[in-house]
Image (spheres, rainbow, N blue to C red):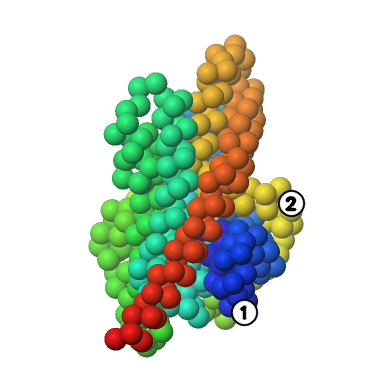
């Protein structure tokens, strides 16, 4: 979900403080546009789209056999359940979330590779990266949900309460993962053995503790070692096998720890390939656009669905397959418009403020020892 951290880190090396003071958003945007990996953006955008369409399939197909069907239980399935189960494989919301975590591990690690401003500037920047858009989405979804309360809206705004918008559980993990990446990057700068020790401890904890936060720290750990892989290990064959494992693990294995391991391994292979190779699927202009607005789109696809329901789309008297198509097009289209507006009005200014806060805190930390 982090579209700009790597670009910001490199821009920090190229853009003078005076230029950023004169026009922070434009200066940052120009440098980041020249330096960021657009294929990773495209992958992130496609993952966000997969979440939105997957949730549309759940809304129309239900949470029964069409959602929970495995290879062992597929015999005797109805045509409708089989088609919606296939849609869940093609637009796998759960798998897309794992891709987000591995991507964040990679991008945040890159952003910290040659720079350590200290934990406080880092946390400040992450705060302004995540919270402003979360707050804006909470207000929009709260407005569209008559039964919502201000406690829910405020809780969702700071990533605490997931009752208003269920996908916020992933942002809670993202916050913990951000801290994990900082600890890993710091350990690696001190001594590689510390980094390897943290990796081993993280994988061990995930093995014994399957709760979401400790389990998915392994996904961030996998993202953190993507750039350490030898080139010979990254090719189309491993990417294809990774994609198949990512998309079909739950269908072939059913729920459980083994399924999660296959999903994380699959996401690791896919992200590693896209990080070093360009392909049409992730390099086209639509994928790039989705990548730019992926964070607000991810949080606001529920708003698109709520508006679609208010427009009467779910009440149309058509067959389930046609209803899924119409509902997906309408809700996703509305969500993209809301996401683009939020990106321009909230996300970009929030990132600029976060970068200013990071620089200000960094300068104060450097001045304090000198004054002492």
Residue extending furthest toward the top? 317
Question: Residue shown at 56%/23% (left/top)?
Answer: 308
Q: Residue 347's x, y, as percent?
A: 53, 50
Q: Residue 143's x, y, as percent?
A: 44, 27
Q: Nearer the viewer, residue 266 or 276?
A: 276
Question: In the rendered view, would you say 86 is above or below 257?
Answer: above
Can residue 201 be seen here? The reply is yes
Q: CA distance from mark 2 to mark 1?
A: 29 Å
Element at badge 2? helix
Residue that carries the numbered disc 2 in the rendered image: 285
Q: Nearer the viewer, residue 158 or 27?
A: 27
The crowding category of the residue bearing disc 1, from other C-alpha atoms within 10 Å (few below 14, some 14 to 19, many at least 20), is: few
Q: Residue 227's x, y, as percent?
A: 54, 76
**Marks 2 and 1: CB-CB under 8 Å?**
no
Question: Is 241 displayed left or right of 121 in the figure?
Answer: right
Question: In the rendered view, would you say 89 is above or below 274?
Answer: above
Q: Residue 153's x, y, as percent?
A: 36, 35
Residue that carries the numbered disc 1 in the rendered image: 232
Q: Quadrant of the C terminus?
A: bottom left
Can residue 100 be seen here? The reply is no
Element at badge 1? helix
């Amino acid at each position: 979900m982090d579209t700009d951290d790597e670009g910001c880190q490199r821009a920090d090396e190229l853009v003078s403080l005076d230029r950023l003071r004169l026009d922070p958003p434009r200066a940052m945007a120009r440098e980041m546009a020249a330096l960021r990996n657009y294929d990773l953006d495209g992958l992130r955008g496609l993952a966000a789209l997969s979440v939105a369409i997957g949730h549309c399939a759940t809304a129309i197909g239900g949470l029964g056999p069409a959602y929970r069907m495995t290879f062992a239980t597929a015999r005797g399935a109805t045509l409708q359940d089989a088609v919606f189960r296939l849609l869940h494989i093609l637009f796998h919301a759960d798998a897309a979330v794992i891709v987000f975590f591995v991507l964040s591990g990679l991008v945040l690690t890159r952003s910290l590779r040659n720079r350590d401003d200290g934990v406080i500037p880092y946390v400040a920047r992450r705060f302004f990266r995540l919270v402003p858009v979360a707050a804006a989405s909470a207000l929009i979804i709260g407005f569209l949900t008559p039964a919502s309360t201000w406690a829910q809206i405020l809780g969702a705004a700071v990533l605490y309460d997931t009752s208003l918008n269920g996908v916020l559980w992933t942002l809670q993990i993202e916050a913990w993962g951000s801290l994990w990446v900082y600890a890993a990057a710091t350990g690696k700068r001190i001594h590689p053995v510390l980094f390897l020790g943290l990796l081993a401890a993280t994988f061990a904890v995930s093995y014994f503790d399957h709760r979401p936060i400790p389990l998915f720290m392994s996904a961030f750990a996998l993202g953190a070692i993507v750039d350490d892989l030898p080139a010979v290990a990254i090719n189309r064959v491993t990417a294809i096998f990774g994609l198949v494992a990512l998309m079909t693990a739950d269908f072939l294995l059913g729920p459980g720890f083994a399924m999660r391991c296959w999903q994380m391994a699959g996401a690791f292979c896919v992200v590693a390939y896209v990080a070093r190779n360009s392909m049409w699927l992730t390099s086209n202009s639509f994928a790039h656009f989705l990548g730019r607005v992926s964070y607000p789109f991810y949080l606001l696809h529920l708003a698109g669905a709520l508006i679609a329901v208010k427009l009467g789309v779910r009440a149309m008297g058509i067959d389930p397959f046609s209803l899924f198509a119409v509902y997906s097009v309408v809700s996703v289209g509305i969500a993209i418009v809301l996401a683009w507006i939020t990106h321009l009005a909230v996300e970009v200014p929030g990132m600029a403020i976060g970068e200013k806060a990071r620089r200000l805190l960094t300068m104060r930390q450097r001045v304090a020892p000198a004054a002492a």
